[in-house]
Image (tube, helix red, strand yellow):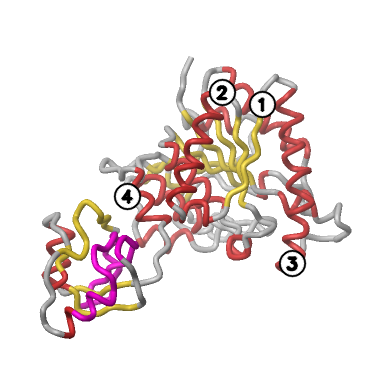
């Protein structure tokens, strides 16, 4: 028996027919594999798209809607139908499923972030399978990008999962779009996610979903920096989920970062809402990025936005306006402005323990 935690993310294209509506056979195939893994002792979390696909025809639309309000209405109808499909399939094997609807706000608020973590831990301990989706009925910004890839990475990081599997309609990352470039080469393993990789990833995807390979790379970046390896593979094979656990099928494995962030720094880096920023000089950049030192008020050269003590702000290099990290401040913007104006800036603005480099 194993107690490894695996987060599976299933996209719209892996759940739908060609006309965009929900494919019950595909869902049955997925839940059957989840049940087999559950019986082997794995702790399973499923992040699923598909609420809009499940609901738009039931609501009277001939094809998947494009207007925000129509998408939200379709999601409101479809979410219940989607969870019912999963629940009925899993109950055949005596497995309890739990519906969890999240938005970015649930991660941005530190208290809700902890609550979500604790609730998920209880569900897994009690051998339930949490089925997670974005709350598409109210999440206006999220519904525009349809980014359950990022949501799955956030959940995997939150749980310190042993693996995140992103199932899609392509078998991993290529050097170019394999549908249009016959010379595209498959990449089986990635040790570091670079800007060149993001450039290569542009253009992959399918019409029923709203995210391509770029969002999967962004998700992989979040997860791997949090210490979670990521495997991207195709869902087309009948045993894709079973094989993905050991990467027996064709796909791309992103190795976890050796210097994984703890949960508090994960929250600061990826989820904390930042409405303000400071620009710092070259000396401060070097001290923070290469010497592991705190940011002194004297290193600040410009402020943007207002902030109070304890808030998280973004920190940019003045030379090239590059984001170098985020941190929790020990001075308000008003006090810092006053100090800078009087030429008497002193003390620590961000302590190194409240800092994360990006």
Image point 67% across, 49% down: which residue?
12
Distance of label 3 from label 4 (alpha carbons): 36 Å
Residue 112 or 335: which is nearer the viewer? 335
Residue 234 or 339: which is nearer the viewer? 339
Distance of label 1 from label 3 (alpha carbons): 32 Å
Crowd rating for badge 2 (residues with CA inside 10 Å; few <14, some 14–19, many 20+): few
Contact between marks 2 and 3 (CB within 8 A): the answer is no
Would you name the residue on which mark 4 appears? 265
Whether the magenta-drawn stretch holds residue 157 is answered as no
The label number, if any, that marks residue 126 in the structure image: 2
Secondary structure, mark 1, is: loop
Would you name the residue on which mark 1 appears? 96
Image point 40% across, 55% down: which residue?
270
Image point 20% across, 65% down: which residue?
349
Which residues, given as a range, are shown in magenta?
309-338
Q: Residue furthest top?
A: 1
Distance of label 2 from label 4 (alpha carbons): 28 Å
Would you name the residue on which mark 3 appears? 69
Q: Earlier in the sequence, mark 1 or mark 4?
A: 1
Whether the magenta-drawn stretch holds residue 310 is answered as yes
Contact between marks 2 and 1 (CB within 8 A): the answer is yes
- Specify whether 24 is left or right of 294: right
Q: Earlier in the sequence, mark 2 or mark 1?
A: 1
Distance of label 2 from label 3 (alpha carbons): 37 Å
Q: Does residue 305 show up?
A: yes
Residue 190, percent across and down?
37, 46
Residue 94, percent across and down?
70, 19
Q: Does residue 182 show up?
A: no
């Amino acid at each position: 028996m194993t107690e490894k935690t695996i987060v599976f993310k299933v996209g719209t294209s892996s759940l739908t027919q060609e006309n965009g509506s929900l494919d019950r056979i595909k869902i049955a195939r997925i839940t059957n594999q989840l049940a087999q893994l559950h019986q082997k002792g794995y702790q399973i979390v499923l992040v699923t798209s598909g609420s809009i696909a499940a609901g738009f025809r039931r609501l009277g639309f001939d094809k998947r809607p494009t207007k925000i309000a129509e998408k939200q209405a379709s999601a409101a109808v479809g979410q219940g139908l989607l969870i019912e499909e999963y629940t009925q399939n899993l109950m055949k094997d005596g497995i309890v499923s739990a519906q969890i609807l999240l938005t970015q706000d649930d991660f941005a608020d530190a208290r809700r972030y902890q609550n979500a973590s604790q609730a998920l831990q209880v569900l897994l301990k009690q051998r339930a399978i949490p089925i997670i989706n974005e709350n598409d009925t109210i999440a206006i910004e999220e519904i525009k990008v349809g980014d359950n890839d990022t949501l799955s990475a956030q959940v995997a990081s939150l749980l310190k999962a042993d693996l995140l599997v992103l199932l899609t309609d392509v078998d991993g990352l290529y050097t170019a779009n394999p549908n249009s470039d016959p010379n595209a080469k498959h990449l089986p393993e990635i040790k570091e996610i670079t800007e060149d990789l993001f450039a290569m990833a542009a253009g992959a995807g399918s019409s029923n979903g709203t995210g391509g390979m770029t969002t999967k790379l962004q998700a992989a970046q979040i997860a791997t920096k949090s210490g979670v390896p990521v495997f991207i593979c195709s869902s087309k094979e009948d045993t894709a989920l079973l094989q993905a656990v050991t990467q027996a099928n064709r796909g791309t494995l992103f190795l976890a970062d050796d210097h994984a962030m703890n949960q508090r720094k994960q929250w600061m880096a990826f989820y904390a809402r930042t409405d303000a920023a400071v620009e710092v000089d070259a000396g401060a950049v070097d001290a923070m990025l290469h010497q592991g030192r705190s940011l002194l008020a004297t290193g600040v050269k410009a402020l943007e936005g207002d902030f109070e003590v304890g808030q998280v702000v973004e920190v940019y290099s003045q030379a090239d306006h590059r984001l170098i990290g985020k941190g929790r401040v020990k001075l308000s913007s008003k006090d810092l402005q006053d100090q800078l104006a009087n030429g008497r800036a002193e003390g620590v603005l961000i302590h190194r323990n409240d800092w994360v480099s990006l």
